[in-house]
């Protein structure tokens, strides 16, 4: 059978790749550097692609993610509830280290390298640094939690420890700084409905918008929808919810998501 990790699968994938040898080498360097980097994000800013703080303690987990991916949001929120530090490598920002490369090609090259290393190019890709092993994706992490094997891996025990790892919902409720947001959604026909979401205050505007779109099962591209606070302030894309709560108080807890008008320009740096 042809699989992603089989020789036939690799040859077929290689024939479809558009990256140059130089870009492939750069992608390999990016991934390998991320896996050994001693930087970690603090509990208040670790979800921001622009906020990297050097600490002497290496991260236990390394995640390769995209800020607009709902499954990445789930994985980050889950790991934020655990005591072990983790580092997030935002794939769409990695190309900034190599200004001579086309952004789209560089991102593709990084995902191709992840494919070579893990057998999949989808995100999130999760690496357990303390065990020097790839865990897989969000479903694999969730399975480890539900089976009770997660903490045994985390603490280095040789055998599974059953009954210790709480279920996913319980862990999500233990995330530092949870907030309930009320979202008013208006569709292209003027129809209106409301939903409430409980989210960690460490989520960025992009993550929050992705989660709300998934909650509402919205079709269309990410840029087809616009999210503001109830007082009309545009939600920053890459800043945590906590920052907006401090600046605007209760107004930031009431959001409006609407369809972007045909003649309305796409926002840059805002949701």
Image (spheres, grey):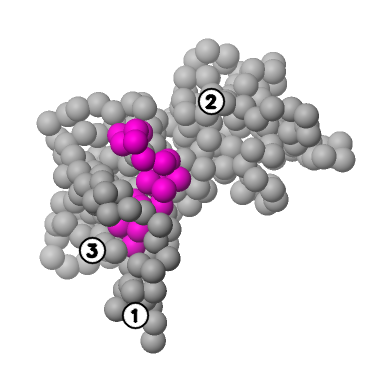
Residue at (33, 26) in percent of width and height: 51
Give the residue pinned by disc 1.
8
Identify which residue, 31 or 191, lies in the foreground. 31
* Quadrant containing the N terminus in the rendered view: bottom left
Give the residue pinned by disc 3.
161
Residue 269: image tag: 2
Q: Is residue 173 visible?
A: no
Separation of disc 2 and disc 3 at Cα?
44 Å
Q: Is residue 136 above or below residue 189?
A: below
* Quadrant containing the C terminus in the rendered view: top right
Q: Is residue 44 above or below residue 65?
A: above
Judge left or right: residue 188 versus residue 52: right
Q: Is residue 221 visible?
A: yes
Q: Quadrant of residue 94?
A: top left
**Residue 148, image x, y percentages:** 31, 63
Say few, some or many: other residues with alpha carbon within 10 Å of mark 3 (under 14 / 14 to 19 / 20 or more): some
In the image, farthest residue toward the top: 247
Q: Nearer the viewer, mark 2 or mark 3?
A: 2
Considering only order in the chain, which callout, 2 or 1, is on the residue closer to the N terminus?
1
Q: Which residues are magenta?
A: 96-115
**Residue 166, image x, y percentages:** 37, 54
Residue at (50, 47) in percent of width and height: 69
Say few, some or many: other residues with alpha carbon within 10 Å of mark 1 (under 14 / 14 to 19 / 20 or more): few
């Amino acid at each position: 059978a042809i699989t992603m990790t089989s020789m036939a699968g690799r040859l077929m994938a290689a024939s479809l790749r558009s990256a140059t040898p130089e870009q492939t080498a750069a992608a390999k360097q990016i991934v390998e550097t991320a896996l050994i980097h001693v930087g970690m994000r603090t509990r208040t800013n670790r979800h921001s692609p622009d906020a990297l703080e050097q600490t002497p303690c290496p991260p236990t987990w390394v995640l390769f993610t995209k800020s607009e991916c709902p499954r990445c949001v789930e994985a980050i929120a889950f790991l934020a509830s655990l005591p072990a530090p983790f580092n997030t490598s935002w794939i769409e920002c990695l190309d900034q280290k190599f200004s001579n490369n086309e952004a789209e090609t560089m991102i593709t090259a990084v995902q191709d390298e992840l494919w070579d290393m893990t057998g999949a190019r989808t995100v999130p890709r999760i690496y357990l640094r303390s065990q020097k092993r790839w865990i897989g994706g969000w479903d694999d992490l969730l399975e480890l939690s539900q089976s009770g094997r997660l903490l045994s891996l985390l603490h280095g025990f040789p055998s599974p420890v059953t009954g210790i790892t709480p279920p996913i919902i319980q862990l999500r409720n233990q995330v530092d700084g949870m907030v309930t947001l009320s979202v008013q959604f208006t569709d292209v026909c003027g129809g209106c409905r409301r939903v409430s979401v409980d989210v960690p205050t460490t989520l960025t505007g992009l993550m929050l918008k992705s989660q709300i779109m998934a909650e509402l099962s919205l079709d269309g591209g990410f840029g087809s929808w616009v999210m503001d606070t109830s007082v009309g302030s545009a939600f920053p894309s890459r800043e945590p919810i906590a920052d907006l709560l401090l600046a605007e108080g209760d107004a930031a807890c009431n959001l409006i998501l609407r369809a972007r008008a045909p003649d309305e320009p796409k926002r840059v740096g805002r949701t």
